[in-house]
Amino acid sequence: MYTKDQFEKYFCKIIGITIDKYRERFVTLPCDCQDDDCTGWACVANNELSIKVHNNRYNGGDHV
């Protein structure tokens, strides 16, 4: 299981962007999708609709 910070650094390394660019474009939210490969975190587009959809689908509520 990753910490939130570890997840963000790992994700940035994989897609080849800086942490600043990541935080401009995305937010990291808790994820409870139950997928075997899930780290417990999700990279979600930084807009209200994407955040709401993720939280409703994978968290049963509002998290930011």
Image (cartoon, rainbow, N blue to C red):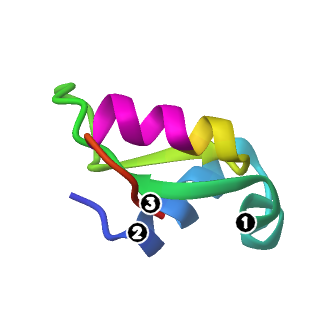
Does dot 2 land on a helix, a strand or a loop? Answer: helix
Amino acid identity at mark 1: Arg
User: Mark 2 and mark 3: span between their CA atoms?
Assistant: 5 Å
**At 73% from the left edge and 47% from the top edge, which residue is drawn?**
47
The circle on residue 6 is none
The earlier-in-sequence mark between 2 and 1 is 2
**At 61% from the left edge and 57% from the top edge, which residue is drawn?**
27
Dot 2 corresponds to which residue? 4
Q: Nearer the viewer, mark 3 or mark 1?
A: 1
**At 28% from the left edge and 47% from the top edge, which residue is drawn?**
39
Dot 3 corresponds to which residue? 7
Q: Position of residue 18 (x, y in %)?
A: 79, 66
Q: Mark 2 near mark 3, Cβ–Cβ under 8 Å?
A: yes
Amino acid identity at mark 3: Phe
User: Mark 2 and mark 1: span between their CA atoms?
Assistant: 12 Å
Q: Mark 3 near mark 1, Cβ–Cβ under 8 Å?
A: no
| Image quadrant assignment for residue 12 | bottom right
| Image quadrant assignment for residue 57 | top left
What span is colored magenta in the figure? 52-59
Find out whether residue 56 is within the magenta segment.
yes
Dot 1 corresponds to which residue? 23
